Every structure is written in C-alpha cells, then in structure tokens.
Image (cartoon, coloured by chain):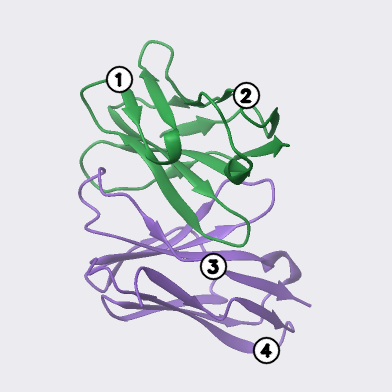
Chain colours: A green, B purple
C-alpha cells in the first residue's frame, strides 16, 4: 500500500516571496509522483509529474519539484509567488506500471498575502 | 466544449430524494472516475470505469450507483443519501488505467448538500 503525507495544512506567504510545500510518501514499489492544484470552485489541475529520469521536475506557472528517493520526498517549490497562486495543492502518488490507483494527500492551502 | 464537464454544479437534496450527477469528457479518454472530496480528508476514490467496464468499487455504499453508458459519459445515481454524504463530487478521466503515467483530468465538481 502507498500513502502520502502533507504536513502543512496551510501555508501563508507574502507576495514575491519563495515557497516550499512539503510532501512525503511511502511505498514498497517504484512510484510516479504528481502535484495537482485546485483553485476555488474548480476541480484539480495537474501542475507537474515525476515519472523517471531527472529528479528536478518543472511544471506550469513557474513551479518545480524535486524527487528525493532516499528521503521519500517530493517537495514543491516556487521562487516568487503571486496572488494568483492562492489555491490548494495536492501531492499524489501511484505505483509505476500496472493499474493506476492514485493516492492523494490531504492538501495544503497556500495563501499569498499582498 | 473541451475537457471534463460536470452538471449540475450545485445540488441540494433531501434524504428521500433520487438525483443523478452527470459527467462528460471531450478528451477522447477511455477511463473515467468518481472521487469524493470532503473537508480535511484526502480525495476518496469511489469508482473507476475502463472501456465502460467497472474496474473499481471502493467499498462505496449502495446508495451510490454509477453508470457508464459509453467512454465519454459517466453518471452517479443517488438515492436515500445521508447528511454525511454532503461533499464535492469530482469526475475525472484519463487515457488508460494500465499506465501510472497518465494524469487525471478533473471536472469542476458537483457540490452536493444533503438536508
């Protein structure tokens, strides 16, 4: 079985400051990792994904994440946030190959303060 | 229309009512999903359809009944719901379920309130 932990339920940050949203996972097999974003009154939208290869993954809207196998982490970062980044961010994991059952974290609400 | 469309956006129903949620995807995908999103809980996978066949029924109560008439449409039929069923119900689609690399595309959800 796999699981995802997002330790921070809410992260307030000032506009133009950097931000890191933390995600740790556990799995007994190889995994694929995802970050999704949910803006108010909308569904989830894929930000980025790690499948294999380079551990630094770049996504949309200037976000990036780094896969760290030894620490079983996949933290999301942005060097300078905008008001429009205010949303809820979900880390997700699925096993590589086979049937895709995605396990989501509980989400982290990013609040960008003007 | 493009993407994944869900109707209605909001639904209020009594515990004795029968209603249906509708989802339509215009992405040419062959797998569709129902998720339940409740406050302060991870997304809960409810049902998965691949090529119109149900491949996952995640211990969901029988008061929720899915239907997938073709690869573009997915319904969730609701009857005799409980107040704790109030939540945001999200539909998603993907290209295949055998490859973990296929990301999910979500609709905007139906906000369900059971009174």
Q: Are marks 2 and 3 in contact (CB under 8 Å)?
A: no
Front residue of B3/A92: it is B3
The label nearer to you, 4 versus 2, is 2
Task: Return the x and y of residue B76 as percentages of the image width and height.
Answer: 48, 77
Q: Residue at x 61, y 89 (%)?
A: B18
Q: Give the secondary structure at mark 4.
A: loop
In terms of image quadrants, where is residue B4? Answer: bottom left
Q: Are marks 4 and 2 in contact (CB under 8 Å)?
A: no
Label 4: few (<14), some (14–19) or many (≥20) C-alpha neighbours in 10 Å:
few
Query: What is the quadrant of the N terminus of chain B in the image?
Result: bottom left
Extreme residue in the right direction: B115
Mark number for residue B17?
A: 4
Q: Give the secondary structure at mark 2.
A: loop
The label nearer to you, 4 versus 3, is 3
Label 3: few (<14), some (14–19) or many (≥20) C-alpha neighbours in 10 Å:
many
Q: Chain letter of disc 3?
A: B
Disc 4 to disc 1, how far (Cα)? 50 Å
Q: Chain letter of disc 1?
A: A
Mark number for residue A55?
A: 1
Task: Return the x and y of residue A8 as percentages of the image width and height.
Answer: 66, 29
Of the numbered discs 4 and 3, the one sitting upstream in the chain is 4
Mark number for residue B109?
A: 3
Q: Chain letter of disc 2?
A: A
């Amino acid at each position: 079985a796999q699981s995802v932990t997002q330790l921070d339920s809410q992260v307030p940050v000032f506009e133009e400051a950097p931000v890191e949203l933390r995600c740790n996972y556990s799995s007994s097999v190889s995994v694929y990792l995802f970050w999704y974003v949910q803006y108010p009154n909308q569904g989830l939208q894929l930000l980025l994904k790690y499948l294999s290869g380079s551990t630094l993954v770049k996504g949309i809207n200037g976000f990036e994440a780094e896969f760290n196998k030894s620490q079983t982490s996949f933290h999301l970062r942005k060097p300078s946030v905008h008001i429009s980044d205010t949303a809820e961010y979900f880390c997700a994991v699925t096993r590589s190959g086979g049937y895709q059952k995605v396990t989501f974290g509980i989400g982290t609400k990013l609040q960008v303060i003007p | 229309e493009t993407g994944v469309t869900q109707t209605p956006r909001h639904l209020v129903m009594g515990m004795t009512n029968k209603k249906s949620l509708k989802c339509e995807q215009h992405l040419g995908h062959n797998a569709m999903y129902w998720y339940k999103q409740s406050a302060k809980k991870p997304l809960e996978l409810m049902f998965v359809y691949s090529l119109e066949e149900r491949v996952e029924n995640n211990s969901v109560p029988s008061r929720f009944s899915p239907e997938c008439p073709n690869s573009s449409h997915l319904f969730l039929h609701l009857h005799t719901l409980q107040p704790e069923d109030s939540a945001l119900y999200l539909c998603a689609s993907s290209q295949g379920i055998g490859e973990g690399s296929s990301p999910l595309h979500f609709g905007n959800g139906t906000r369900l309130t059971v009174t």
